[in-house]
Image: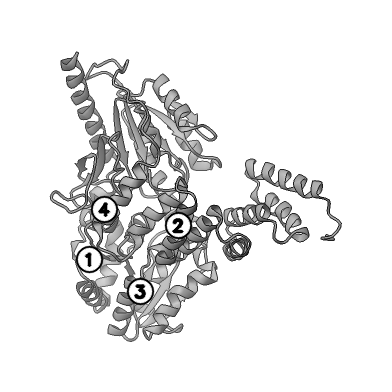
Amino acid sequence: MDRTSTPVSDIAGLLAQADEEVSAGRQDKAFVLFGSVLAAEPRNLDALKGAGRALLAIRRLNDSAETWEAAYEVAPDDPEVLFQCGVMQFRRGAMDAACEYFDRALAGQPTHYGARGMRLLAMFYQDSDNGAAIWRAQQDWGRQRPAAPLRTVYENDPDPDRPLRIGYVSSDFRAHSVGFNLLPIYQRRDRERFRLYSYAEVPQPDAATRLFEEASDVWHSTVGLSDVEVAEIIVADKIDILVILAGHLDENRPYIARYRPAPIQINQYDICSSAMDEYDYFIGDRVVTPRGGGERFSERVIRLPTFSAHTIPAEAPAQGPLPALRNGYVTFGSFNAPQKISDRSIDTWAALLHAIPASRLVLKHFEAYSETATRTRILNRLAERGIGADRATVLDAVDRRSEHLRAYDQIDIALDSFPFSGATTTYEALLMGVPVITLAGDRFVSRCSAATLDAAGLGVCIAHDTDSYVARAVELASDAERLAVIRGRLRQALTQSRVCDADQYVRNLGRVHRAVWRRWCFRSQNSS
């Protein structure tokens, strides 16, 4: 396109068309239109922003990063550009750099919701013991949206034994780790006692979304609605217990709770406390939220036998034989997201590989390692510690879950990340017969793997410092016959443990909902 002959009206028209494609979810077509604008005006900030977002949506990570870097050259003080550059660094696992960008974005736009949320989230990935600073950041995040006028009068019938209306607010009614844990609640509940209302922030539904919709008693899409509009729908539905899922993550809607649309409000599957008075309860267990632990919660913590439950996916392949028996050496692996792999994790893994000179390390996480900077950060740090490319390998991404699980056939022992541990990733490793070494910290996010391993009877894999982490891995790696036995028996043991007892988990959760409802009924009846 001739840059000197493109009328301004044509540029405006192309941008408008691109925005329409974005709204329709056609990011690939939007990118083409943004590209046409950039061919004429390479420094057009609106087109750079649009192209950067579209490229990220279609998972062209290198191209997205280059586009945001170009946007930064054009507008280095623009809050949205700074935020997206921070997200780029976050995705790579460069948390210090990410926080610098988020801080600059907030300096220019203190009300930037995304920057404040990501700034807090990044703190959970950093190698830091500053719990007081994290709690202050949680409180700042909780106060980011002003509290609405507090509702104190509800029309809900205070009958402690009647069927309950449970509302779930989530962006994860889809093929997602939260969705995998949530689906058994929908499909296995007592339908006579619990009616489920879904408030779905899912702009692009998938096959799992349809399963949730079919299992719901009432389904509402919240896409395009404000918090107050969703709260009004919840009030109209006369929800008894509102459960807001994973509020600090993805596109979830935690601030709906500030309108107090339901008499009881629960924080579940989140990484930490909401630090908001409007939430009544937090769902945990004795491992992720131990009594007397140092982590602070504004909610009352309810400890189930397990904070989550899993079901064996139908597409799960059978476990393969132990690779060490054919390779003649032990292969460690981590399929956790690169942002979870801290510098301290890498240093500890390097020490482990030095302790077993013939061992190898395999890394994988969807398409994350297709971005050069992400791959380079981890492999270069390993190289600096004497672990070269001949011992550390990155696997290509696969989309199908069955193929992803099959990749565990290449590793003997999984290495958990820290301070942010795995959750579904740990479960998937165990499912494929691969034991996981974890380092249990003092926060929810650093104890999820420990909770799963404890429930599966693998407490021997839980370390409490880096030295014991290495020692436990070395001990396990030193006995290939023992590893082969574990591999052959682990899925059956997992299936028979409370990790996979979804029916019991759903019953336990039902008892919790009934108990907190009866408590509210008692207080309501005695205050009237």
Question: Vertically, is 179 above or below 455?
Answer: above
Name the residue at the top extreme.
Answer: 528
**Gap in Å between the C-alphas at discs 1 and 3?**
18 Å
Q: Which residue in the structure is indicated by mark 4?
A: 444
- Residue type of the residue flagged with mark 2: Phe
Depicted 25 relative to depicted 49: above or below: above
Secondary structure beneath dot 2 equals helix
Measured Cα–Cα span from mark 1 to mark 4: 18 Å
**Residue 403 in sight from this viewpoint:** no
Image: 365 above or below 524: below
* Residue linked to disc 1: 461
Q: Comparing marks 1 and 4, which lies closer to the viewer?
A: 4
Q: Which residue is mark 2?
A: 102
SS for callout 1: helix
| Residue 438 image-quadrant placement | bottom left
**Label 1 vs 4, first from the N-terminus:** 4
382 or 191: nearer the eye?
382
**Is 4 left, or right, of 124 in this rendering?**
right
- Dot 4 and dot 3 residues touching (CB under 8 Å): no
What type is the residue that disc 4 sits on? Answer: Phe
Residue occupied by mark 3: 346
